[in-house]
């Protein structure tokens, strides 16, 4: 079974690239299951119920979130009714939504866990202890994958090692810069520090480059608009052994949507 994990979707360019590329990958049967981080899908900040449905219709099987989860307020009222979208499990108790979910796949049940880091991030409960608690509840799943939405590479690498051999895959998100360290860890878990970004290529992590450069040079506040132009999809393709339920390989993916 082929699992595609996709890096943070940024705005409408990212949504278009995701829909165009994933539809063709699924039609070609090169991908069976898609997990995508979409916490920047709504003009770069959060996601709405309507955009959730759009991405699910476009081929997403599970949508994960991150620190911008609540930027679009209408999501709070709708997130409980859609089991295929998850927000970080180590948000404070009582937050709407769920931190993990399970879906059926051709090779058995797949659990998807969303966690958020604490280094250089807003306060959150311990993601390591949170992972331990959730894993006690996912014993019935054949495959378990983790989207760890975190800033520091050290924290992401530590999570990969902490969960090595206990989950199928650990993929970092949040920085919008794809790392080149995809690997199978010593105990068999597929790992990458950051999946990258699905969004406009001519940008600074998905935002209009001129606006970001001006902010760096004059320090004045500005609205960070999503950039325009050609877009690409970044992530990893993980081949899963249906007999052993372990990863066979992990490969970086970077696909560009044709020019329009």
Image (cartoon, rainbow, N blue to C red):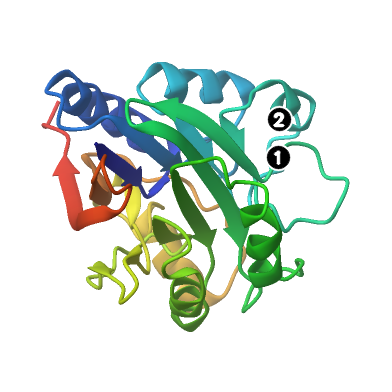
Residue 11 lies in quadrant: top left
Q: Would you identify the image quadrant in which residue 124 lies?
A: bottom right
**Residue at the (33%, 57%) spot, across then down:** 196
Which residue is more in the foreground, 120 or 136? Answer: 136
In screen coordinates, is 191 left or right of 112?
A: left
Q: Going by the image, does 129 lie left or right of 38?
A: right
Residue at image x 34%, y 46%?
A: 5
Q: Mark on residue 98?
A: 1
Q: How many marks?
A: 2
Q: Is residue 7 visible?
A: yes
Residue 75 badge? 2
Label 1's element? loop
Task: Return the x and y of residue 182 as percentages of the image width and height.
Answer: 25, 67
Relative placement, left or right, of 54 versus 256 is: right
Relative side of 135 to 229, left or right? right
Could you tell me residue 137's position as x and y percent? 67, 47
Q: Do we see residue 39 in this rendering?
A: no
Q: Which of the pair 108/101 is nearer the observer?
A: 108
Numbered circle sitting on residue 66: none
Q: Position of residue 91 (x, y in %)?
A: 75, 56
Quarter residue 133 falls in: bottom right
């Amino acid at each position: 079974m082929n699992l595609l994990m996709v890096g943070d979707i940024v705005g409408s360019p990212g949504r278009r690239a995701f829909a165009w590329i994933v539809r063709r990958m699924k039609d070609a049967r090169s991908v069976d299951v898609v997990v995508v981080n979409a916490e920047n899908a709504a003009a770069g900040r959060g996601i709405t119920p309507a955009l959730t449905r759009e991405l699910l219709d476009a081929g997403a099987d599970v949508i994960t979130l991150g620190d911008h989860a609540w930027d679009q307020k209408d999501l709070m009222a709708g997130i409980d009714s859609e089991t295929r979208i998850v927000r970080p499990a180590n948000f404070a108790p009582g937050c709407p939504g769920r931190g993990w979910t399970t879906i059926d796949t051709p090779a058995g049940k797949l659990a998807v866990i969303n966690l958020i880091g604490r280094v250089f991030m807003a306060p959150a409960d311990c993601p390591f202890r949170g992972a331990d608690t959730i894993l006690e509840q996912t014993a019935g799943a054949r495959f378990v994958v983790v989207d760890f939405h975190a800033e520091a590479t050290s924290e992401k690498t530590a999570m990969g090692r902490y969960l090595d051999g206990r989950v199928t895959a650990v993929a970092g998100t949040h920085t919008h810069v794809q790392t080149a360290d995809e690997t199978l860890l010593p105990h068999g878990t597929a790992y990458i520090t950051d999946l990258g970004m699905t969004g406009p290529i001519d940008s600074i992590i998905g935002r209009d480059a001129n606006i970001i450069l001006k902010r760096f040079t004059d320090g004045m506040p500005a609205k960070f608009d999503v950039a325009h132009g050609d877009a690409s999809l970044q992530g990893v393709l993980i081949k899963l052994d249906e007999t052993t339920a372990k990863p066979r390989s992990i490969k970086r993916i970077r696909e560009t949507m044709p020019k329009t």
